Image (cartoon, helix red, strand yellow):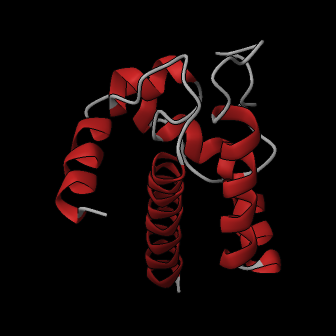
Amino acid sequence: MNEEKINRLFERLALSKFRSRFHLKEKDFQYIEAKGLSTICSHAHDFVEKRLAPAEIPNDGKQTPMKGHPVFIAQHATACCCRSCLYKWHRIAPHKTLIKEEQDYIVTVLMTWIKKEMENHSKNISKEI
């Protein structure tokens, strides 16, 4: 994975009022702590495979909830929530099954965002102490 490409993506996402308003909440951090990052990554792979990878998604644009799991929040924050956002932000073409490399790229983006959120959360906690 090209780190520079991901950095450019995050710079662009930061400029979006809509995308930059998404952040994990305390219950999300607790869930991540309880489950562990490897389980969260496994969930991300599963969500991407089932909700984004098929060529045609019956409820595309509405398949990703806005809350309920840290990966769902990450999907909206990183524009990995539906096929039209994947095309607009990541240039991943709609109406074709996502190959493994595309799915892995999406999971890398999601997990990078989650890890950044965790780092920021840790910094904020240490400031409070």
Q: Position of residue 52 (x, y in %)?
A: 64, 33
Q: Height in image: 76 above or below 120?
A: above
Q: x%, y% of residue 97?
A: 59, 31
Dividing the image into 4 quarters, which one contains the N terminus?
Answer: bottom left
Give residue 65's quadrant in the image.
top right
Q: Give me the residue at 43% from left, 77% from top.
A: 123
- Foreground of the two, 11 or 22: 11
Instruction: Please indicate whether residue 25 sits to the left or right of residue 125 in the image.
Output: right
Image x and y of residue 36, in percent: 73, 80
Q: How many marks?
A: 0
Name the residue at 74% across, 78% down: 33
3 is higher (above) or lower (below) than 45: below
User: Which residue is painted at 72% across and 18% down in the image?
Assistant: 57
Residue 47 at x, y percent in the picture: 73, 46
At x 73%, y 71%, the residue is 32
For residue 89, what is the image quadrant?
Answer: top left
Q: Which of these two is toward me, 49 or 24?
A: 49
